[in-house]
Image (cartoon, rainbow, N blue to C red):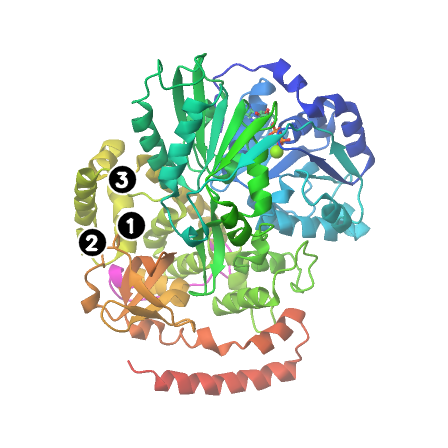
Amino acid sequence: MFKKTSWKPNDSESKHLPIYRHKTKLVQAVEDSTFLLVTGETGSGKTTQLPQYLHEAGFCKNGKVGITQPRRVAAITVAQRVAQEMKCTLGREVGYQVRFDDCTSQDTAVKYMTDGCLLREVLADPALSQYSVVILDEVHERSLNTDILLGLLKNIFSNPSKATRGRAFPLKVVVMSATMETDKLSAFLSSCPVFAIPGRVFPVTCTFGSAVGPKDAESTFYVKEVVKVALDVHTGEKAGDILVFLTGQSEIERACDLMFEKAECIDYRYDVRDRTVEGLLILPLYGSMPTDQQRQIFQPPPPGIRKCVVATNIAATSLTINGIKYIVDSGFVKQLSHNSRVGMDVLEVVPISKSEAQQRAGRAGRTSAGKCFRIYTEEFWEKCMPEYTVPEIQRTSLTAVVLTLKCLSVHDVIRFPYLDRPEERFILEALKQLYQFDAIDRRGGVTKLGELMVEFPLHPGLTRALLRAASLGCQDLLLPVAAMLSVENIFIRPGHPDKQKEADKKHRALAAKTGGMNDFATLLSVFQLCKSSDRPSAWCKDNWIHWRALKSAFSVETQLREILVRLQQRKDFPVETFVGNKSELLRRCLCTGYFTNVARRSVGKVFCTMDGHGSMVHIHPASSLFDQEADLNWIVFHDVLVTSRVYVRTVCPIRYEWVKDLLPKLHEVDVYELSSVAREEVTDEEVTKWETREAAKRQQEVSAEDV
Ligand code: ADP
Ligand code: MG
């Protein structure tokens, strides 16, 4: 697939980047070592230039140069930029691949991709034989997949026979990072050579605000404050662009609307200190934004106009915007973390770390001295902000990653070389979940089902539900649901209250088409209705549905279907039969994957989860089951949202009989036993003893449960 890049390249720009003077030496250093660590300030040109230098030096003759990015948007945006600099069509010599979007071809020599994509490629081809050089970029971000790739590559190189197996020539690995934690990284990579790109940074003066103090750690009123501070900068400071850090799409859109409204009232004759400033251009920047809009971010504003980019953390290190002189820092970030209160991974808005705050401030000092306005107090900095950001591997579910490692024959997942070791209980939790999904057996070995599961770039629970459906021959019910759950929210939520009412009405009508009691079925129905419509985009507009999100859902569904069709050709693909109606079939398949997310009505509108945490949860108001709680006893849900309450979203009612054989699995694995599974030290005798004991326990639990 090719995508046209429409704007003109500007070569001379790249010659001014700090990396340019070191081109020859850098290429030589890659040539001379198998493992090389390249460090340099963000914006020095590592991501966009080094792959081009290697391409120019002939490294692509033996294979591709692959560059990983922790973030999807970064992979796409940077590939676009490099295609433009190399004067080629995106998808030809320069391409990108992110989950569910492959923009590469046979000609692709320089390939940007997410770290998750490379991890999947390692699964299919552990020697990475298509590549001559692999560059792990943005390693300081410490994303889960990059950390795992680091460990895997270290493993390969500590065993020379592994390093060359299946390859005609040795692979070169370059690890790139900003100037954080350099010593630690180099030590981890067996003291590999380090190439530090010297860069000049200009001083940035930081000031604290008074709006957010230690008591406000959970408040969201900071959006207003951020807007106020940004406009104060606009009216009170000299020319220079502004970069505002907020946490997510809806917040950013709200801030942009508010800022726009207020900026319209500025009288440039009287209100603005710098007379050369004649207007404000407000631009949002977040992950799921259409890429054409993202391009605007990088273009210099028209003369006299000040640019104000309102961004997520993506602008902290992954993307560099030239011309930024002022930073407005909210002090918060949206981050996926394991929430011990609900025993699940939850996206939460949390205070950033001090090192992150310094990184954000640094974005104002790339080309001249800058200023950073923190809206929080110094006390907030002292009391609420940790020194460093906890790496993702130490705060999120490891289920998918552990399955990947096991499929790569890394059985001892506890002693795997982690740059920062996750707590053992997180590894055990992952093993337990995999065991519950039948992806691994009691000895920790990958089952046939596990081998099938690892092929899908989805959450293991969703994959499990999908595979169950496929074995029952009803994949057409689950594929669209899985696709819809893999794209951004499809329901439009307008800011204006009247419009919101109108949207709610339409959404309720869509839910009513399937009986109004199953959010998963609503997703399926929206997918089918839109797909069969003559004018799908108009249909979406009419129903307050994001057409762009649905279009991606269509594409995701096709890709999932392709994976499934390929797997179904295997002789051992499971086959089952079932007699019953579609609604029951869909919900039963969901139970198979989501039995870890089962809840039972407790009192009133409160439900209690059955996973051993016994968390009290409420049905989210956006669910079609909201306000119908009285008729429900058992439900399964897709995910949770934690605010002052714990809400479950995307819900459907189930019957206890459907999960009664599955629920005991949630309790039967005991952590002590699993730790030996993890270390592979169990004997046959122990397994038999344990199985007998567990079977007896299970029998007791099942009969004690009231139906
Ligand atoms: P590093 O990886 O060292 O942080 P990059 O290679 O990302 O540095 O950035 C180098 C330069 O390229 C920066 O000045 C940045 O503004 C510019 N740049 C990167 N992507 C784009 C883009 N899509 N459009 C315009 N300029 C870009
Ligand atoms: Mg970079």
Q: Secondary structure at mark 2?
A: loop
The crowding category of the residue bearing disc 2, from other C-alpha atoms within 10 Å (few below 14, some 14 to 19, many at least 20), is some
Q: Amino acid at mark 1?
A: Leu
Is any atom of residue 103 visible in this view?
Answer: no
Name the secondary structure under disc 3.
loop
Q: Which residues are magenta?
A: 568-584
List the residue tagged with mark 2. 514
Q: Which label number is shown at residue 73?
A: none
Q: Point out the quarter of the image occupied by ligand 2.
A: top right
In the depicted structure, whether residue 18 falls above or below residue 258 = above
Within 10 Å of the Cα at label 1, are there few (<14), some (14-19), or many (20+) other Cα atoms?
many
User: Label 2 near label 3: C-beta < 8 Å?
Assistant: no
The residue that label 3 is drawn on is: 545
| Coordinates of residue 504 in the picture (x, y in percent) | 20, 45
In the rendered structure, does residue 420 fall within the stretch colored magenta? no
Q: Looking at the image, is 353 positioned above or below residue 445?
A: above
Q: Separation of disc 3 and disc 2 at Cα?
A: 17 Å
Any atom of ligand 1 within 8 Å of the CB at mark 3?
no
Front-most of 587 and 359?
359
Q: Which residue is mark 1?
A: 524
Q: Amino acid at mark 3?
A: Ile
Q: Residues within 10 Å of mark 3 (few under 14, many from 20)?
A: many
Q: Residue extending furthest right?
A: 32
Q: CA distance from mark 3 to mark 1?
A: 14 Å
Q: Which amino acid type is shown beneath numbered disc 2?
A: Thr
Q: Pinpoint residue 704: horizontal percent, then vertical percent.
A: 35, 86
Q: First in sequence, mark 2 or 1: give its number.
A: 2
Which circle's residue, 3 or 2, is located before the other in the chain? 2
Tell me whether the residue at label 2 lies in contact with that at label 1, contact meaning CB atoms closer than 8 angstroms. yes
